[in-house]
Amino acid sequence: MSPPLKWNDSTSTIQLLDQTLLPVEELWLELTAPEEMAEAIRALRVRGAPAIGIAAAYGSVLALREPHTDPASAVEAAIDLLESTRPTAVNLSWALRRIRGKIRPEVPQAALKASLLAEARAIESEDLDAGRHLGRHGLSLLESGMSVLTHCHAGGVATSGYGTALAPLIMASEADKRLSAYVDETRPLLQGSRITAWELGRAGVPVTLITDSMAGHVMAAGRVDAVIVGADRVASNGDVANKIGTYSLAVLANVHGVPFYVSVPLSTIDYSMPDGDGIIIEERVPEEITHGFGRQTAPVGVSVYNPAFDITPARLVTAIITENGIARPPYSESLVALRRQ
């Protein structure tokens, strides 16, 4: 799977796949300024925690596309703007901290741009490598013939190419394993039906699409052998912030004895966050629910609560898959041990 964005050296612009149009249209946008990248992140044109971090890193470099009398300040302003776009995904602030650490006020603009671009490329390359390792570690938990249920989208276009939760499914053929997938629609924006089903289908993985409310039924019927999801932030104790509906899946998996796995790069683990209580949950506009894809489906003036994420307690997580290995409870110890490797 190709990455969702590409830096163009000849024009110093970014080519970005507009994920809001998938699967009907594959449109690549050309972004020329940090403000355009900020809009793309807010509007979910680029989404998925790793991809957001990579996009923001490259987006900060766009601040130096034009000459500046104070290039360092221009980059700082771009970083502040990009950092404000989405509060839940930790990869965003993590990547921008790395970019900020490369700013040197005394360095000429051309040299500063080269340094920032090299760091953005390093962030992307590290994520691609992490995806390969996530896939291999995830596959070690699965047997040929298993069916995996996943929620939202954590595949190639949500990262630098391999994905997190989808990496084992995409790489299964390389390991001579036959896996199939149940995919939640993931309401209200249908990232599962629009993007996950599309991506897995292109990878040759047999896919069955279900509504979010069918998950319990398919588990009770014995159709699901494991649940694998990604995450936007994992606290140091193993609490998981992921797309709304993940918590419900974890509860259902626990009731039905189905292992519940979370697959994330170490960059998604917020070691400064002791537990999920401190994670800011982004709330999005009511129209995503009342006017899904442009059509009114709710009474005018109805009160709407639209959190984009929920918190799954660590006690419901069977294991956390990272590029350095698989963490199991107690996560406050195992996640720290993996970080040190």
Image: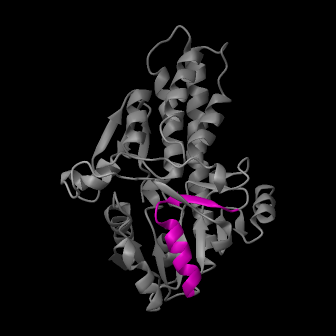
**On-image quarter of the C terminus:** bottom right
| Residue sitting at the far bottom | 221
What x and y, as percent, mark residue 18? 33, 47
Picture layout, residue 172 above or below residue 262 = below
Residue 105 vs residue 173, the one in the foreground: 105
Range of residues picked out in magenta: 238-256
Q: Quadrant of residue 208?
A: bottom left
Picture layout, residue 152 above or below residue 269 = below
Membership of 102 in magenta stretch: no
Picture layout, residue 247 above or below residue 301 = below
Residue 223 vs residue 137, the one in the foreground: 223
**On-image quarter of the N terminus:** bottom left
What x and y, as percent, mark residue 62? 46, 27
Direction from residue 195 to residue 159 in the image, left or right: right
Q: Residue at x 47, y 70 (%)?
A: 170
Membership of 255 in magenta stretch: yes
Direction from residue 155 to residue 258 in the image, left or right: right
Q: Residue at x 60, y 22 (%)?
A: 112
Direction from residue 301 to residue 95 in the image, left or right: right
Q: Residue at x 58, y 46 (%)?
A: 91
